[in-house]
Image (spheres, helix red, strand yellow):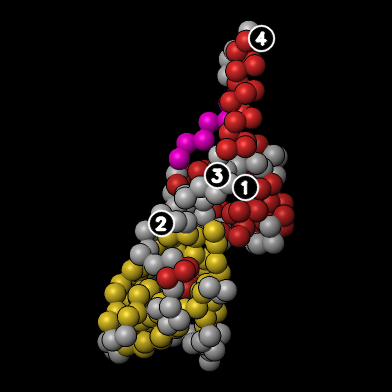
Amino acid sequence: MNQEKISAFIKKIRTENNLTQLAFAKKYGVSYQAVSKWENGKNIPDISILKQICDDYHIDLNDLLEGKKNNNKLPKRILFAGLVIIIIMLLISYCLFFMPKKNKDDFEFKKLSTSCDNFDIYGSMAYSDSKTSIYISNISYCGEEDKEVYKKLNCTLYEVDNDTKKIIGTYSSNEELTLDKFLEKANLNVEHYSNNCQMYKEGALELEIEAITYNDETKLYKIPVTLDDC
């Protein structure tokens, strides 16, 4: 996912339609702070919201996820000879009837969640026949109240295969933060993940949050990540 392009896209869509950040936020059921973070490149919408924005404003979601330039400007010359128009119409008809309905790069989406009682996560796996991306946009702590300020926090997404764990995504902060404040900023974007939905095994993904105190003590939270409806 091209985060810079997505941020610019959201701001352009909002301003061109004369919407304030608050009005845009209400349209998609989020806070205006979330819209501000999207436009500043600090975060991007969840896949389901991004898909809805693209549908509302007639944007190709696959192009946006790939970071491709999508030039929708009308050509300067719109008048053609009758013969050229006939040829174009024939070509369009051919494409409609003979092109495959699904391209190998068309994305499908599955929701990520967790069975952990102390954490909620919100994210998606976007996958096609040729590639897979994982994006976790929101992690929230719902366990016992923890107001301790930590000197360092790490969030790591692992691919788990029996006793082997492979790091596939990380987010870290050296700021002095509480766990809640860290999780407000944390997001993970994994491009070209090797497994897609059809290959996914239960327990194949695990999120670990490491909180280091000023006494160099470490609190470690392990969060199993599940993929719905695979």
Query: Which residue, given by chain and number where applicable, does mark 4 sit on?
Result: 82
Disc 1 to disc 2, how far (Cα)? 21 Å
Which segment is the magenta one?
A: 68-74
Mark 1 vs 4: CB contact within 8 A: no
**Residue highlighted by disc 3:** 100
Which residue type does callout 1 highlight?
Answer: Cys
- Disc 4 or disc 2, which is closer to the eye? 4
Secondary structure, mark 3, is loop
Q: From the viewer's perspective, tell me whether residue 13 is left or right of residue 203.
A: right
Task: Check residue 81 in the rendering and tell me which mark sits there, or answer none.
Answer: none
Residue under pointer 2: 131
Residue 214, image x, y percentages: 31, 84
Say which label, 4 or 2, has the lower sequence index.
Answer: 4
- Of circles 3 and 2, the one toward us is 3
Element assignment for label 1: helix
Q: Mark 1 highlights which residue?
A: 54
Give coordinates of residue 65: x percent, y percent: 48, 49
Q: Residues within 10 Å of mark 2 (few under 14, many from 20)?
A: some
Estimate how packed mark 1 is, as few (under 14), some (14 to 19) or many (20 or more) residues with alpha carbons within 10 Å: some
Residue plotted at (69% across, 39% down):
17
- Image point (55%, 49%), residue name: 102
Q: Secondary structure at mark 2?
A: loop
In magenta segment, residue 199 = no
Q: Secondary structure at mark 4?
A: helix
Q: Amino acid at mark 4?
A: Gly
